[in-house]
Image (cartoon, grey):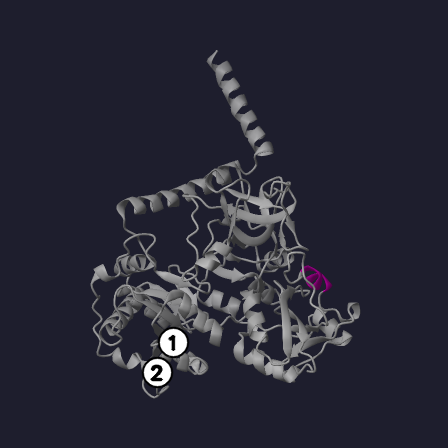
Amino acid sequence: MSLGWLSALLAGVFSAHVLQTLCFPYFWRDLLFLLKVLRYGARLELTKLTRSARTVLDRFVQQARRIPDKPFVVYEGRVHTYRDVELRSNRLANVFLDSVKLRKGDCVGLLMNNEPDFLCAWFGLAKVGCSVAFLNTNIRSKSLLHCFDCCGAKTLVVGSDLVEGLDGVLDVLLEDNIQVWAMGGPGGHPRVHTLLDKLDAASDQPVAAALRAAASLKSPTLYIFTSGTTGASCVLKKKFSASQFWTDCRKHNVTVFQYIGELCRYLCNQPKTAGDQVHKVRMGVGNGLRQDVWREFQSRFGNIKMCEVYGSTEGNLCFMNHIGKIGTVGRSNFFYRLLFKYDLVKYDMVKDEAVKDPNGFCQRVEKGETGLLLSKVSALSPFFGYAGSKQLTEKKLMRNVFGKGDAYFNTGDLMAEDRDGFICFKDRVGDTFRWKGENVATTEVTETLGLVDFIQEVNVYGVEVQGHEGRAGMAAVILRAGMAFDGGKLFEHVTRDMPPYARPLFIRLQDVMEMTSTFKQQKFQLVHSGFNPSTTSDPLYVLDYQQQSYIPLTDGIYRSIQAGERKL
């Protein structure tokens, strides 16, 4: 009898296993991923209850005590241990207190390239209780000043190699009583203070730990205008080099790297070598990786697990492709939807707005259909908004979406979810697009172009370019009456006042600017028509760095761009 029960039990277990494999093939991996999410969530709730927050700096200080001699950063062949960075950031903290006169609660802008002193300056500022605004080193003039307006910083710490780039805004910064300190020694800019000459005399003893203590999770610590990452040992390069990437990985025994989609494409475009799969890299983490590049990357460089993630610094929702399915940014399931309430709603690309039913509410899409991703704002998934701008915060919210009184965070992204719960990114809508791994705000580009004397009206949008991730900037322009297009003057304007990734690559001259039924500028048709000179009668121009001008976009130039022969 006991053998009969045992056989029945084994048969039942086997049947359940077969049923689970066939009907719920991702059950165990989904469950393990959920348990990790719950574990981190429990830590956050514990932090709320104890009214104390554990920061990146707290973790670093702990590691510096535990493993002081372990490499923390490898930069240009030189190893910086945890102890090295701890002592140098202590010296900087004392300089910030004694010479710069910073105090707990102050906000400081940090404008530096990838280098060890970026970390030392950040940690030094955090040790004296300052919140730090990471500033994108590509931004210029008005965009840089806008960052200060948002975060309220009254001090700027700038890398010695970036001081000259402040010439256009230094007067304004000083007039606004913003003190500027360079991470350099004497002999630099006469109106910029210096830090390195004060380090030798500064103590390397830690400042009072109470200064860096964060009262709660809502205490401002970082203002992020550009992306970044932290980890244990880190190999840092001032600039990305596709030709040296795998050599660096082999030299430093790199196991994990962070990417944007463009980076992987650059690597695939390098000449093939016999050592393409000779490395210890096992995982890449990032976003924006196209399916074709993903497949080519793994085929050429080995079975590296690519962990695509989706999210934003300010958003209240994220996805992670923990399964590793090519072409998707994540996977949803019953467990995930219990924690995060999100929906994909119908979106009218022509009108540039969500589709509403007769009652004025949004309509959900069917499985497999593309829709606008919205995430419900709740106590479990709050949206804290943007620093310094309640108007921008409110603009990111959609209210009365499915019922009176509800509120959803508008991601501005079109997504699709298949029947297995895999989610893929389709496109961006609204006032931003991505190019060269950066977000381009069409409103800022429009404002900058509008300052050119011969331009009356501008409509900025992004167009797809074969073989490139994201969208290249393009501007439809109406000229002022009696004035002519001047490609040289426009080139000088955009190269002076815009970062490289935001400069429109293509210009389209129009007589009339099309509008939507709600009086918005019509972008859909312009995006759809692209930049092919053979399909439009409007004059087209392309940015040319050799001639330092916007030159006519000919059929030959168009073909060279599509063939990947012309560098963009």
Q: Which residues are magenta?
A: 524-529
Q: Residue at point 48% right, 18% down?
A: 6
In terms of sequence position, does the residue under pointer 1 or pointer 2 come before the other?
1
What residue would you read off at disc 1?
158
Asked if marks 1 and 2 touch (Cβ < 8 Å), the reply is: yes
Position of 186 with respect to 558 (left or right) is left
Depicted 371 relative to depicted 530: above or below: above
Instruction: State whether residue 436 appears in this view.
Output: no
Quarter of the image holding residue 263? bottom right
Which circle marks residue 192 in the picture? Answer: 2
Position of 561 with respect to 375 (left or right) is right
Depicted 158 relative to depicted 305: above or below: below
Q: Residue at point 51% right, 48% down?
A: 319
Graded by Cα atoms within 10 Å as few (under 14), some (14 to 19) or many (20 or more), the crowding at tag 1 reads many
Please provide percent x and percent y for residue 170. Answer: 41, 81
Please provide percent x and percent y for residue 288. Answer: 57, 58
